Each structure stands twice: as structure tokens, then as C-alpha cells.
Amino acid sequence: MSTVVGDAAGRWPMRLYRTLWLFASLISFGPSSAAFPASQAEEQLLIAYGSVSETSVPLWLGIERGFFKKQGIGARMVQVSGGPLIMAALASGDVQVASAAVSSVLSAASGGLKISCVASPNSKILRNLMVRPEIRGLAELRDKVFGVQSIGGGNWLQTMIVLDHLGLDPDRHQLKLRVIGNEATIAQALMKKNIDAAVLTYSFSETLKRAGFRSLADAGEFGVPFHSGVICAQRDVIASSPELILRLLKGVIEAVTFIHDPRNMQDVMESLKKHLRLSRTEDAEASYKLLRLMTTVDIGPNPEAFKSAQKILLRLNPKIGQVELERIVDGSLVRSLEESGFLPQMRKRMGSYLRP
């Protein structure tokens, strides 16, 4: 397997994190709570995220629709390119919370970052293995080039899980992984046939299918435990401000219920068009359907999702096998939402949207 490893394998010295964050701070900011009048009672919270995809929508809507403001949080989001830089921002203290890939979390933890993950509203891999039109089966993928966003990042992890499930070993089948950029750039590279294959969200897949490209597998049918956009913070931040993080999770859950309410379809689609730069209504509709499939109010972190990621990441860095998952996965805050009655109430609301 041809790859570039570097920092994605957890080898960044901790002393470099603040230097890296100086570069990350040059990346553009996402939605801001400035759309709502600031209250002196609001606690300010800066959230780093990397995925410009459906994964980030609950956080975007949390700000745009005032769900975080309702919880007394003045939230802002900063887009940071790449998992290592997201972890750098978290380690430096310049952001309090990160929405990150499990792979980035485990890599940072193996390097010494004391981090815990408390929730994820995204619990499924809903992507297609898309290939050039002339590739008709899995056997024809030998020696082919796959596009990924970064080695060790969320897109890479999902690609590796899909390949593993299909019995495709990158070394044995001599697959080449090429770092391309974000998902839109990867889809464009496949469209131009600069790469042979990529594991892409349904919205990008639909565009490629219309152009004659082929899907060899739908990861949504695998049933593999998975998390994306995992909400994490340094352990001492959670220990010192548990109520703040708890209120953040309430806002995320309300955003998910907003997504699933059919009456909000047009509003959610407008947000998708804006953030994902979708010009076609059918692409926004496909993205909306994907969003409803992948998001859940049962946002408690699943240890099995972390275990499966850890297994894959051992290929990059054996130190990741030493990470104690029970110190990373913290379901206590979600359990408190269950015990308080908030989560059952939201689950009941979700159930009403699913009835005919």
C-alpha cells in the first residue's frame, strides 16, 4: 500500500501542537452565533471541525437555529483542515471542543493527549464505493488508485473499513492511496479520472452515477459500528465544565430532532446547499435523505466503533493499540440526559416523525 504516514499516525510531538494551531487559525470560520444577539450570560464555546459534509450539519444547525443559544451557549465553529490540526487546536486550548474522526482521536491519544469523547450524532457509514465506469467488479481494483482526504483521517478510516469488509487488503491487492483533499475535490478527481476509486457520501455518489460512474458497494448495508463527527474535549475541560458540555449535547440533540421533522425539510436543505455548495435541488434532496439516515438522538459513544477503528489504525502506528479505550469513551453525560428524562422526551418526539 502506497501511503504517506507522518503525523496521522500519532507521531507529532506534543510541543508542536501550538505551532500547528497557528496555521490552523488561518482556516475560515464556519457559522457564528453572531447571527443571534449575544447575552452576557452566554458561555462562549469554540468548536473545531474538519468535515465539510453532512457530518457537521447538527452543529451548523445548532448555531443557525439557536439551539445552542437556547442552552446559554455562544458557540462558534472553526474549520480546520485535517485531524492532526484539529487535535492541535484542542491540545493548545484555543478551542474547547472538537468534532473529529475517531482515527484522529486515537492517534492524538497515542501521542499523549488526555482526551475524552462524549457523543456522536452520526452512527453509520453511509457511502458508496465509487469507481470509474470501466471497472466492473472488485477483482478489477488491483493496482488501482484510491483518493482520500488524508492518511489517518475520517475519510481514510471509512475507506479502510469498507475495503476490510469487502476483503480487499491494500497491501495484498497493491492498492494505492493518494491524498487529494476534501470530499468535493476527491469526487472531482474521480470525475476527471485522475484516480480510479473513492468511498464517497451518497450525495457525491449520485452526481457521479449520473455521469456514468459505478458503485461497487453500499457501506450502508454493512452494519459496521462506526462514528463520525465525534464530540470530544480534553478531560480536564469536561471535569471542570460538565454542565457546559451537557448543554452543548442538548443543543446537538435538538438539532437532530429538527433535521428529522419533515416540516423542516426545506430549511435543512437550504443549509445543506449553503455549506456543501450544492446547486442542484436533487443533490440537496439526496444529501437530506442521507442526513436523516445517519443522524440519531441516541448520541452516546459506542465502544465498538472505537475498537474497530483501533484495529484499522494499528496498520499505521502500533502505539495506538496501547490506548485504553475506557479512558477515551465517556458515556456519563449522555447517561445523565437519559436519567433526567431529556433524552427519552427527544426520542419520543423523533418517533412521532417516523409514524406514517
Image: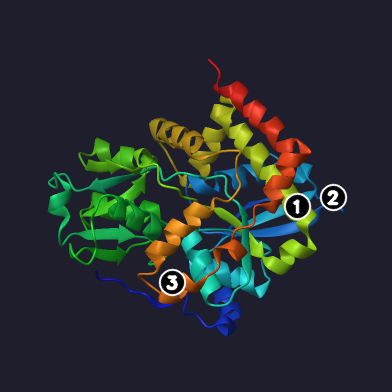
**Residue 143 spot, x, y in % from top left:** 15, 62
Pointer 2 or 3: first along the chain: 3
Q: For the residues marked 1 and 2, what is the alpha-carbon distance in whole angstroms?
A: 8 Å
**Residue 63 spot, x, y in % from top left:** 67, 46
Is mark 1 in CB contact (under 8 Å) with mark 2?
yes
Q: For the residues marked 2 and 3, what is the alpha-carbon distance in whole angstroms?
A: 39 Å
Q: Nearer the viewer, mark 2 or mark 3?
A: 3
Q: Nearer the viewer, mark 3 or mark 1?
A: 3
Pointer 1 or 2: first along the chain: 2
Q: Residue 39, labelled with which disc? A: 2
**Residue 14 spot, x, y in % from top left:** 57, 81
- Could you tell me which secondary element the residue under label 1 belongs to? strand
Which amino acid type corresponds to the residue marked 2 in the rendered image? Ser
- Could you tell me which secondary element the residue under label 2 belongs to? loop
Residue pointed to by mark 3: 8
Residue displayed at 56% across by 54% down: 230
Q: Quadrant of the N terminus?
A: bottom left
Quarter where residue 324 is shown:
bottom right
In this view, the residue farthest toward the right is: 40
Quarter where residue 242 is shown:
bottom right
Instruction: From the viewer's perspective, tell me whether residue 104 is left or right of residue 251.
Output: left
Residue pointed to by mark 1: 74
User: How crowded is the residue under tag 1: few (<14 C-alpha within 10 Å), some, or many (20+)?
Assistant: many
Q: For the residues marked 3 and 1, what is the alpha-carbon distance in whole angstroms?
A: 31 Å
Is mark 2 in CB contact (under 8 Å) with mark 3?
no
**Residue 254 spot, x, y in % from top left:** 67, 37
User: How crowded is the residue under tag 3: few (<14 C-alpha within 10 Å), some, or many (20+)?
Assistant: many
Pointer 3 or 1: first along the chain: 3
- Could you tell me which secondary element the residue under label 3 belongs to? helix
